[in-house]
Image (tube, coloured by chain):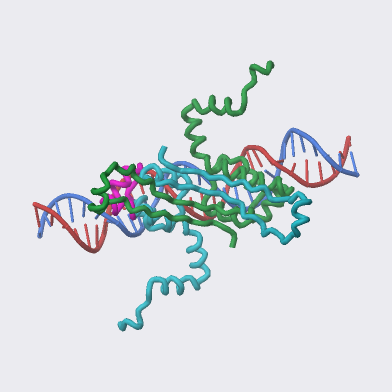
Chain colours: A cyan, B green, C blue, D red
Amino acid sequence: MKLSEMKTSDEVLAESLRDPAYAVEWNRTTVARAVALQVLSYRVEHGLSQRLLAKRLGMSQPQVARLEIGEHNPTIDTLARLAQGLNVEFAIDVRPIEWEPKLVSKRAQTHHAVATYQAHHATVLLAAG
Amino acid sequence: MKLSEMKTSDEVLAESLRDPAYAVEWNRTTVARAVALQVLSYRVEHGLSQRLLAKRLGMSQPQVARLEIGEHNPTIDTLARLAQGLNVEFAIDVRPIEWEPKLVSKRAQTHHAVATYQAHHATVLLAAG
DNA sequence: CAAATCGATAACAAACTTGCTATCGTGAAG
DNA sequence: CTTCACGATAGCAAGTTTGTTATCGATTTG
């Protein structure tokens, strides 16, 4: 194969994403892939086998393998367990998206109470206890 | 009942948490309760019934009720759907916890490559769009 | 070559969340 | 009183993730 015929992984991905079903699946597993990177990189950097890490996380070797493949979204419980074992924090931040503030004259701004959507920010921290 | 005999909800909670099984459950449902607050407050502030909000989220009224009760951890997929319907972002932030940096002399710092745990921050954004 | 270890994967059970329908008691409106 | 909409909840099916055991091919080690 000539060099000019080769495709980068990005190109391959972009092509695959043209398939709507694949795109949905790709989108659905966004969290799974982020977690996969965490687990894999942690494991490699610490020179652990899947079996050893599995033991440390209180799960089986196949489950670690599945997490590293990243095709299933882990449950919240699993995130919490990873936080324990991998020395990472999962901070789930909930932030309401503000509506586009309408253009209002300065006078109107000072004279009218703005019926704002009361934002309820919240951060849930899953970390080693 | 006398006022002096009354308990605040915090006191009741602290008492319940003495039960180990209850404590585990309380911890397990941390995310569920945060989501519950989001759903409930959004719904009330917009004057929606559970049925109307359910329709808007593409789910049933009992499911909205369950989310508001907060005793089940929603799946990642559900978080994504709530992000769509509630005008909120769920930012799942993964941050490795740095090891306590050992006290090292300035000279050592400049002369030795530090074998650091390579931190892999990652933020997954579940949002409308 | 033989043995051990590795990661990937299949197969099945168990647990949990969600979808759905129906129903209950409550409270408001007619 | 009757009617209506509300939220809570039961019951059951369906889908997804996890737990578990076993096995596979590949690689390393003796």
Residue segment shown in magenta: A41-61
Residue occupying the point 48% across, 63% down: A26
Of residues B103 and A51, the one drawn nearer to the viewer in this rendering: B103
Quadrant for residue A33, please give it: bottom left
- The outermost residue toward the front is B107
Residue D4 in the image: above or below residue A97: above
Q: Quadrant of the C terminus of chain B?
A: bottom right
Residue occupying the point 49% across, 37% down: B27
Left/right of residue D9 with respect to residue B115 in the rendered view: right
Main SS category, magenta section:
helix
Residue B118 position within the rendered picture, expressed as x and y whole percent measured from the top left: 33, 53
Q: Is residue A49 visible?
A: no
Left/right of residue A76 with respect to residue D5 in the rendered view: left
Residue occupying the point 60% across, 45% down: B67
Of residues B116 and C4, the one drawn nearer to the viewer in this rendering: B116
Check if residue B101 falls in the magenta segment: no
Of residues B9 and A66, the one drawn nearer to the viewer in this rendering: B9
Residue A37 position within the rendered picture, expressed as x and y whole percent measured from the top left: 38, 56
Residue A62 position within the rendered picture, expressed as x and y whole percent measured from the top left: 34, 51
Q: Quadrant of the N terminus of chain B?
A: top right
Of residues A110 and A93, the one drawn nearer to the viewer in this rendering: A110
Left/right of residue D15 with respect to residue B100 in the rendered view: right
Quadrant for residue B69, please give it: top right
Residue occupying the point 74% across, 59% down: A104
Residue A100 position within the rendered picture, expressed as x and y whole percent measured from the top left: 67, 59
Q: Is residue A106 visible?
A: yes
Count the marks.
0
Left/right of residue B103 with respect to residue B43 in the rendered view: left
